[in-house]
Image (cartoon, rainbow, N blue to C red):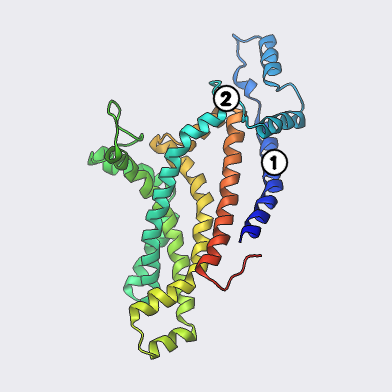
Amino acid sequence: MTKYIIKRILIAIPVLLGITVIDYAIMCMAGSPLEMLQGPRVSEAAVQAKAIALGLDKPFYVQYFVWLGQLLHGNMGYSIKNYQPVAAMITSHLGPTLLLMGVSLLVSILLAVPAGIYSAIHQYSKGDYTVVTLSFLGSSIPGFFLAMLLIYLFTVKLGWLPSGGMTTLGTSGGAADVAVHMVMPVIVLAVSMAGTNIRYIRSAVLEILQQDYLRTARAKGIGHFLVINKHALRNALVPIVTVIGMEIPVLFGGSIIVEQVFSWPGLGLMTMSAITNRDYPVIMGVCLLSAIVVLLGNLLTDILYAVVDPTIKLQ
């Protein structure tokens, strides 16, 4: 296992470099942050001086290697907009994003696993049709639309939940206050993931239920609960782990829209602000972090394969 992890990490290094090259090229083609400074009150000489100060007067490949050299020395650069260190900005916004992602992933699993198993066991029943219909509905509703709907219902009409932020303004916050502010963002993220996962879990359990060893287990008199939750679920975990592992990068990207709608002070809100202002260092820092999250998610998924299925050997 240790050799496998080291091998995957070594393979991830050139992959990360390739991703950063592509991201930097796309970012440069999208436009220069100097365009945000141009106007009747700013002279061309001032713009050129700013370009020289930021190193934006150099060719694309030179800018990239300058950024890469700073990164290898542990410096992710400084924000063009507010001159703060990018690493400090990401660190300060990472906690709220991880909290929102972690709770949303946990809630989606708690919803999807029981619903998918129930739907598979009661195939072609009214309950099965209800679960499948709700799963299609959950995965089909756009996140921003569901967010607006929840805000209109629970904030505007009922006044039960706050519409944005992480804590109530003018208060010291606290776990209860944060939990109340998390309700609607978690619902939006969890509903979308659960809707997709239910169908995969249902399909995986249905396939396992047709296996001969489960019929043998029933014939030996093993209880229905043990047959489903010990034998069937254990063998259906490999495709389930695959789906959940794929959800981690999707969740990381989907949280950007949700954080923007609910004004959640995480990486999503910071990323949208950086994109609007064409803040190159911040954008590259977030892209690098996103790539690392995807690669770690894939590595974690492979490791979990060996945990849930001892017959799988990682080499």
Mark 1 residue crowding within 10 angstroms, few (<14) / some (14–19) / many (20+): few
Picture quadrant where residue 107 is located = bottom left
Q: State which quadrant residue 166 falls in.
A: top left
The answer, for residue 304, to whether it is visible in the render is: yes
Pointer 1: what residue?
22
Mark closer to the observer (1, 2)? 2
Q: In the visual, does 183 lie left or right of 295?
A: left
Q: Position of residue 136 (x, y in %)?
A: 42, 61
Q: Position of residue 48 (x, y in %)?
A: 70, 14
Give me the residue at 60% from left, 17% from top.
Answer: 37
Secondary structure at badge 2 equals loop
* Residue type of the residue flagged with mark 2: Ser
Extreme residue in the bottom direction: 219
Residue drawn 74% across the image and 32% down it: 65
> Looking at the rendering, which quadrant does residue 68 occupy?
top right
**Which residue type carries mark 1?**
Ile
Instruction: Compute the Cα span from label 1 to label 2.
Output: 20 Å
Numbered tag placed on residue 137 in the rendering: none
Q: Residues within 10 Å of mark 2 (few under 14, many from 20)?
A: some
Residue that protrudes farthest toward the front in the picture: 2
Residue 69, placed above or below residue 150: above
- In the picture shown, does residue 74 fall above or below 11? above
Indicate whether 223 appears above or below 252: below
Q: Identify the image quadrant of the C terminus.
A: bottom right
Q: Position of residue 111 (x, y in %)?
A: 36, 60
Q: Please state which of residues 163 and 70 is positioned toward the viewer in this rendering.
A: 70
- Which residue is labeled 2 in the image? 79
**Mark 1 / mark 2, whichever is N-terminal:** 1
Pinpoint residue 9: horizontal percent, then vertical percent: 65, 51
Q: In which quadrant is the N terminus drawn? A: bottom right
Secondary structure of the residue carrying tag 1 is helix
Q: Is residue 149 visible?
A: no
